[in-house]
Every structure is written in C-alpha cells, then in structure tokens.
Amino acid sequence: MRRLLALVLVLSSSWLLYHALGPLSGLDPVAMPRAIMNASNNPDFMMPFLGAVLGLLGGLTAFLGGAGGATIALVGGLIAAGFSLTAGQTISLTHHRFWESDALVGIGMVAIALLAAMVPQSDS
C-alpha cells in the first residue's frame, strides 16, 4: 500500500512539475536550464516548481523504501499549496478541472503524503 501511495505521489508531483514548466515548454533542452534560472526570481513559477521537485523526490524515496520520503513530499505539497493559496488562487472547482489548480494538487499531495507516512514500513 505504501508503494502505491508513493507512486501516486510521484504522478501528482510530475503533473505539478509539468504544469509549472508549461510556460517554458517550447524551449529546447539546452535553453531550458537558462530559462529556469531566469524565471527563478518569479515566485509564481518558483514555489510550485520547488514543491513539485520536493514532492517528486519524496515520492521516489518513499517508493524505493527510504525513510523520510513521505515527509519530503509533504513539505513539497505544503509549499505548493500554501503559496498558491497565499498568492490568491482559490480552491473552487471551475468546470470540475481540479488538476488545473496548483492549490488543489498541492492539497492532494499533502493528503497522499500523510497517508503514505501513516502506513507501516513493513506493509510496503
């Protein structure tokens, strides 16, 4: 059960990372790191990006059986959801597309990470 929850964490974090990198999607792989460095001063880009990277690393750590992976993913979800809500994004569903809201995806990451943290290590 823990590995299944970790896999869902990896998938939701990957979606959030894809959503955060959306404005930079037309660039070639050589120009992408420079574009990320230029966008690092923009908190509207950087906080969901940082939350997604932490969620992805934490989900992979939990999937591979490492200790603390769910906690890392929990911090990533809190960063993504907390900043999105602080920046004025609402948690209301528009046209039932919850996956388009960084706040709702971050809240989902927090819930899944809490569940993954509560499952015993022996039940992986």
Image (spheres, rainbow, N blue to C red):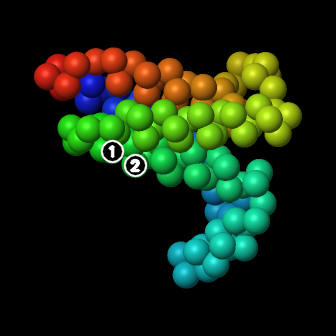
Between 110 and 10, the one nearer to me in the picture: 110
Quadrant position of residue 116: top left
Q: Quadrant of the C terminus?
A: top left
Is residue 44 positioned above or below 55 on the image? below
Is residue 87 visible in this depiction of the protein?
A: yes
Is residue 22 visible in this depiction of the protein?
A: no
Is residue 111 positioned above or below 102 on the image? above
The image's mark for residue 68 is none
Tell me the residue that label 1 is attached to.
60
Q: Which amino acid type corresponds to the residue marked 2 in the rendered image?
A: Leu
Q: Pointer 1: residues within 10 angstroms few (<14), some, or many (20+)?
A: many
Quadrant position of residue 105: top right
Q: Secondary structure at mark 2?
A: helix
Between 12 and 42, the one nearer to me in the picture: 42
> In the image, what residue occupies the spot 53% across and 75% down?
29
Q: Residue 21 location, x and y as percent?
A: 64, 57
For the residues labelled 2 and 1, the Cα–Cα distance comes to: 5 Å
> In the image, what residue occupies the spot 66% across and 73% down?
37
Between 47 and 1, the one nearer to me in the picture: 47
Tell me the residue that label 2 is attached to.
57
Quadrant position of residue 95: top right
Check whether the beta carbons of the residues at disc 2 and disc 1 lie within 8 A of each other.
yes
Q: Which amino acid type corresponds to the residue marked 1 in the rendered image?
A: Leu
76 displayed left or right of 34: left
Q: Quadrant of the N terminus?
A: top left
Q: Secondary structure at mark 1?
A: helix
101 displayed left or right of 124: right
Q: Residue 5 location, x and y as percent?
A: 35, 26
> In the image, what residue occupies the spot 72% across and 73% down?
38
